[in-house]
Image (cartoon, rainbow, N blue to C red):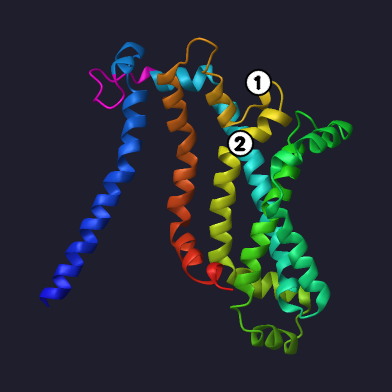
Amino acid sequence: MALHNRNSFLIWFILALWAIVVLIPILIVVFAALKAPSELAQGPLSIPASFEWSNFVAAWNKGMMANSMINSIAIAGSSVILIILFSSAAAYPLSRRKKKWATITFLYFLSGMMIPFQMTMIPLYKLLSQLNLIGKYPGPIFIYIALGLPFSIFLYSAFFKTIPQEIEESALIDGCGPYRTFWSILFPLLKPVTSTLLIMNTLTIWNDFFVPLLFLQGKSARTIPLSIYSFTGEFVNQWNLIFAAVFIGSLPLVLLFLVLQKQFIQGMSSGAVKG
């Protein structure tokens, strides 16, 4: 009994210590966002002498955060939905077929994770320019889909291998075709790994700076990272507004994780990491 209590205390102590470590950078962002520029220059770690809530209003208005939020939601939402649909549909036959073509195709998809984006950005820019997609939503959406497919297919394929094939055989006996079997029976079973990929891909796309900078032009097409970048200058950076914008831009991601945290943890600890 004493050993159990000692282990429980040790676990809670480690968790409390880790919570403090995670909380420190959040407090730094909040404190910096609530300070006047002169006070922030003296140090970001101290508690604000006076809470400048107007910094959030200024960041929202000057950074056109409402428009940027809509752009980020539209681009990230469309990209993630299509990544999930395409990767799950591709992983199903690749994980079930034992033929040589399935293995070669699977390795072909995985090779996409080995090519740095920097090697492809010039050909991509020329291609999207020829297709008249520079400065338009479909351009970065297509790029994010291509970048997200390899890893998503890898996780879905690993998860499919944990699902017994007897489920599909029973569905076939009941008269279900392959499409109905997948979408009505198998796809709902993918909820843990789908939640994991939804959070991971959304986090990657939402925080990406490089692709919007290259392929989206004009203030009306800005995403959240570009709006935050607008507060930097050649000689002066508006750090209080930068921190306020960072805090505002992170709220949708925090909300998404809180909603899907149970499925995210389940997906990371079960089929999503099994081969």
Residue 153, image x, y percentages: 68, 62
Q: Does 89 appear in magenta?
A: no
Residue 220, image x, y percentages: 67, 23
Residue 113 in view, yes or no:
yes
Tell me the residue at 74%/90% (across/down): 173
Q: Secondary structure at mark 2?
A: helix
Instruction: Residue under label 1, please give it.
Output: 219
- Is residue 265 depicted above or below 77 in this figure? below
- Is residue 27 depicted above or below 100 in this figure? above
Q: Quadrant of residue 22?
A: top left
Secondary structure that dominates the magenta span: loop
Where does the magenta region start and end? 43-54
Residue 161, image x, y percentages: 63, 77
Tell me the residue at 80%/33% (across/down): 125
Q: Amino acid at mark 1?
A: Lys
Mark 2 to mark 1: distance in Å? Answer: 13 Å
Q: Quadrant of residue 37?
A: top left
Instruction: Residue under label 2, please give it.
Output: 72
Quadrant, the N terminus: bottom left
- Is residue 52 depicted above or below 259 in this figure? above
Please rate how many residues cluster around mark 1, counting C-alpha atoms within 10 Å: few if below 14, some from 14 to 19, many from 20: some
Residue 201, image x, y percentages: 59, 50
Quadrant, the C terminus: bottom right
